[in-house]
Amino acid sequence: MGDSSGISVTDETLQRSEAAHRTPPGKRPAGTEIRSTYGVTIRQGISLKYRNEEHKMAIKKVVEHPAKVLSTPCAEVKEINEEIITLLDDLYDTMVEYDGVGIAAPQINVGLRVAIVELGEERDILEMINPTVIETDGAEVDIEGCLSFPGLYGEVERPDYVKIEACDREGRVYELEAGGFDARAILHEIDHLDGVLFDSKIKRILTEEELEAMYAEEEE
Ligand code: CO
């Protein structure tokens, strides 16, 4: 990144592909500790239980499809103020409560270009304000879900590499490259900000049997 854009964030661990954590968006393992190594946001060593006991939670109701706010492109954030910081915190608390691996502002009824996503095996939290996709490459079909579509999982083709530019909560512009499932999760959330929902991209919906097998695998 050049001088004008602030910090640059890249991490080779983001570029792993097949060994990626395979839990689809919409599900995350309970009790996972969350740490960040990207200098974006650090919520070190916070487990679900700890947060529930020690922190005032701001859990919002997740908007389910169909809803106008989900299919409307979001407005750019003009200024990072308390409202935006609170929005980021609300998104985090709500994502944890609903066991998601990513969530976008319209999913809690806020039409702004703000989303968060868990990245990598460490489940780091990436905060994205006004994210834009700079580059994509490759293609991969994998299973996706969405908090706004409870119980719906399907095969979706997405690029398996993405480079984005976004703002963090301190207003610093960063650039980030991600691969595999992380790229998928980032692109899924940025789609939300454009009013695009994953059901429009599903090539094949998982059967009841496949869903049961997936849930059983997660419990092991
Ligand atoms: Co979603």
Image (spheres, rainbow, N blue to C red):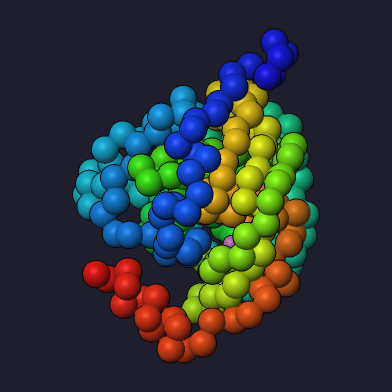
* Left or right for 76, reference 123: right
In the image, farthest residue toward the bottom: 208
Looking at the rendering, in which quadrant would you find the N terminus?
top right
The residue sitting at 63% across, 16% down in the picture is: 6
Looking at the rendering, in which quadrant would you find the C terminus?
bottom left
Q: Quadrant of residue 192?
A: bottom right
Q: Quadrant of residue 177?
A: top right
Is residue 110 visible from the viewing direction of this image? Answer: no
Q: Reply above or below: 78 against 109.
A: above
As rendered, which of 115 and 161 lies closer to the eye? Answer: 161
Q: Position of residue 209 (x, y in %)?
A: 43, 89
* Left or right for 59, reference 219: right
Q: Reply above or below: 136 against 5.
A: below
Q: Position of residue 23 (x, y in %)?
A: 42, 62
The residue sitting at 73% across, 32% down in the picture is: 78
* Left or right for 163, reference 212: right
Is residue 8 visible from the viewing direction of this image? Answer: yes
Q: Reply above or below: 60 against 206.
A: above
The residue sitting at 45% across, 83% down in the picture is: 210
* Left or right for 35, reference 1: left
Q: Position of residue 100 (x, y in %)?
A: 45, 59
In the image, farthest residue toward the top: 3
Ligand 1's quadrant: bottom right
The residue sitting at 27% across, 71% down in the picture is: 219
As rendered, which of 142 and 30 lies closer to the eye? Answer: 142
As rendered, which of 64 and 175 lies closer to the eye? Answer: 175
Q: Reply above or below: 142 against 214.
A: above
Q: Position of residue 97 (x, y in %)?
A: 38, 59
